[in-house]
Image: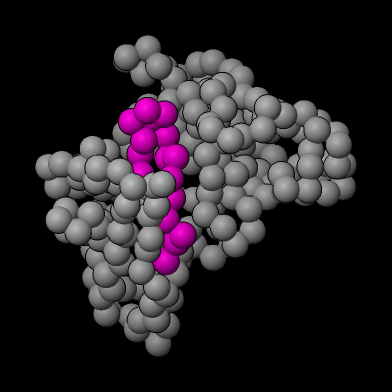
Amino acid sequence: QIQLVQSGPELKKPGESVKISCKASGYTFTDYAMHWVKQAPGKGLKWMGWINTYTGKPTYADDFKGRFVFSLEASASTANLQISNLKNEDTATYFCAYYDGTYYAFAYWGQGTLVTVSS
Amino acid sequence: DVVLTQTLVAQPVRLGDQASISCRSSQSLVHSDGHTYLEWYLQKPGQSPQLLIYEVSNRFSGVPNRFSGSGSGSDFTLKISRVEPEDLGVYYCFEGTHDPFTFGSGTKLEIK
């Protein structure tokens, strides 16, 4: 069955960088896009953007341009999210979600990775 | 950018009653391909969101038929016919028609 397994929680200081991974299994990784979603503590969901898993081309929502990078390790069926120059407001749970081409929706989600930024 | 408005932050409901959650878009969600990419997700406490409804009214695999979606253009509704304890959580609408994609602010379904 389709699974997205994300890397574990991270505790970082302001100004540091973090890389979150999302390993996919159960389907052909390059068939469909991978999206990223942010959820700050106690807040709603915010769409960050997506990466074309076939070409590697990322697309970022405006609030996530600059310090955020989506990348792939296609041979490992893994999508990554890197955040540089971390700020306190980056403290959140980050989800990867697979955009299913049958349903044109996020049919499958990772379990989420909590990133805590604190001095 | 599209704004999805879920006017109710919280919806108190009795178990067994019907619940209705609305989502209004600042512009039509009809894509140029004719489809309307409006989805509903439920996020239970401590869990990842889960897909309930796609393209306005289609139930995802395994979703009970007490969940139904309706609407068109820019006005959408999710109905739960007989609320059960496992239905409690935060419901989000989401649009995948216009770039950037957008989530609604969420409506928490809670016990009255």
| Quadrant into which the N terminus of chain B falls | top left
Q: Can you say whether A117 is above or below A104 in the image?
A: below
In the picture, measured across the screen, residue B98 lies left or right of residue A79, that is right
Hey, which residue is sitting farthest left in the picture? A55
- Magenta stretch: includes residue A102: yes
In the picture, measured across the screen, residue B89 lies left or right of residue B26, that is right
Q: How is the image coloured?
A: one colour
In the picture, measured across the screen, residue B27 lies left or right of residue B42, that is left
Percent from the top left, x then y, of residue A61?
Answer: 30, 46
Q: Quadrant of residue A67?
A: bottom left
Q: Can you say whether A67 is above or below A74 in the image?
A: below
Q: Can you say whether A102 is above or below A111 in the image?
A: above
Query: Count of labels shown?
Result: 0
| Residue at screen point 24% across, 46% down | A29
Judge whether residue A90 can be spotted in this image.
no
| Residue at screen point 33% across, 31% down | A101
| Residue at screen point 86% across, 42% down | B15
Hey, which residue is sitting farthest bottom in the picture? A119
In the picture, measured across the screen, residue A109 lies left or right of residue A49, that is right
Percent from the top left, x then y, of residue A71?
Answer: 19, 56
Q: Quadrant of residue B109?
A: top right
Q: Which residues are magenta?
A: A98-113
- Magenta stretch: includes residue A34: no
Percent from the top left, x then y, of residue A68?
Answer: 25, 60
Percent from the top left, x then y, of residue A39?
Answer: 48, 58
Taking depth in this image into account, of A80 and B98 the one nearest to the observer is: A80
Taking depth in this image into account, of B93 and A23 the one nearest to the observer is: A23
Hey, which residue is sitting farthest top in the picture? B34
| Residue at screen point 37% across, 12% down | B34
Q: Can you say whether A56 is above or below B97 in the image?
A: below
